[in-house]
Amino acid sequence: MTNIEYLTIEAADPAAAQRFYADAFGLDGKQLRVQGSEAPTSGFRGFTVSLVVSQPSIVIGLFNDAIAAGAKELKPAKKSLWGFGGVVQAPDGTVWQLVSSSKKDTGPDVRKIDEVVLLLGVADMAASKQFYVERGLKVGKSFGGRYTEFEAADSPVKLSLYPRKGLGKVAGVATEGSGSHRLLIGSDLGAFTDPDGFEWESAA
């Protein structure tokens, strides 16, 4: 099984970014790393990261902790057709979706993150999907040109593809943006750059 072992967020102030992710989400170096970068970037960086949890109270807790740690609210945490969720933007610019498929609490708030999902905004769904299939990823779910999710049974991070404009709408941000994505994806696939400019590196 092909795995994404970790994500590396590039930030102008890596020490501050590390503090934010520890305080807001309790994420350590296993799934999320931070490194310094002054690469030019502006607007939407073309991706979001989702933290999937079991119930609304956990979403609310993560959301409030993120705001207290300096995040910007993009969408308030509330019920929707598909469940419960909210969206925040970290001080370094990364957009985070905090979500649960449940609309009601069913147990104590244990602040456990069940899944970390990287959603890449792509220009051509068919081309990007084929690109990753050719590199060994297996499609788990696919809805035409609207969404593709790859299997990730044992992977610390799950990969999904979304049309860039649609992803921006879901995240509550304008889709215009240029420059660096300020993201490195560490996996056992090796080093390469995908059709939308997202950089992958060999996990170490």
Image (cartoon, helix red, strand yellow):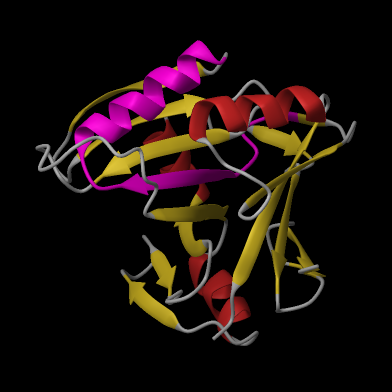
On screen, 63 above or below 198? above
Q: Quick one: quadrant of the N terminus?
A: bottom right
Judging depth in this view, the residue of 112 and 70 nearest the camera is 112
- Give residue 61's position: percent from left, percent from top: 34, 25
- Along the viewing direction, whichever of 160 and 21 lies nearer the viewer: 21
Q: Residue at x 42, y 80 (%)?
A: 139
Q: Residue at x 47, y 55 (%)?
A: 117
Could you tell me residue 83's position as x and y percent?
17, 42
24 over 5 or under it: above or below: above
Residue 54 pos. (x, y %)? 24, 47
Counting from the top left corner in percent of width and height, residue 66 is at 48, 22
Q: Is residue 163 above or below residue 110?
A: below
Residue 173 visible at all: no
As for residue 47 lying within the magenta part, the answer is: yes
Residue 20 located left or right of residue 68? right
Q: Nearer the viewer, residue 131 or 150?
A: 150
Horizontal relation, residue 83 to residue 174: left or right? left
- Whether 164 is among the magenta residues is no
The answer, for residue 28, to whether it is visible in the render is yes
Q: Quadrant of the C terminus?
A: bottom right
Give the tally of numbered discs.
Answer: 0
- Image quadrant where residue 162 sits: bottom left
Res 194 quadrant in image: bottom right
Residue in the picture at 68% in, 49% down: 29
Looking at the image, residue 53 sits to the left or right of residue 73; the answer is left
* Residue extent of the magenta highlight: 42-69
Residue at 25% in and 35% down: 109
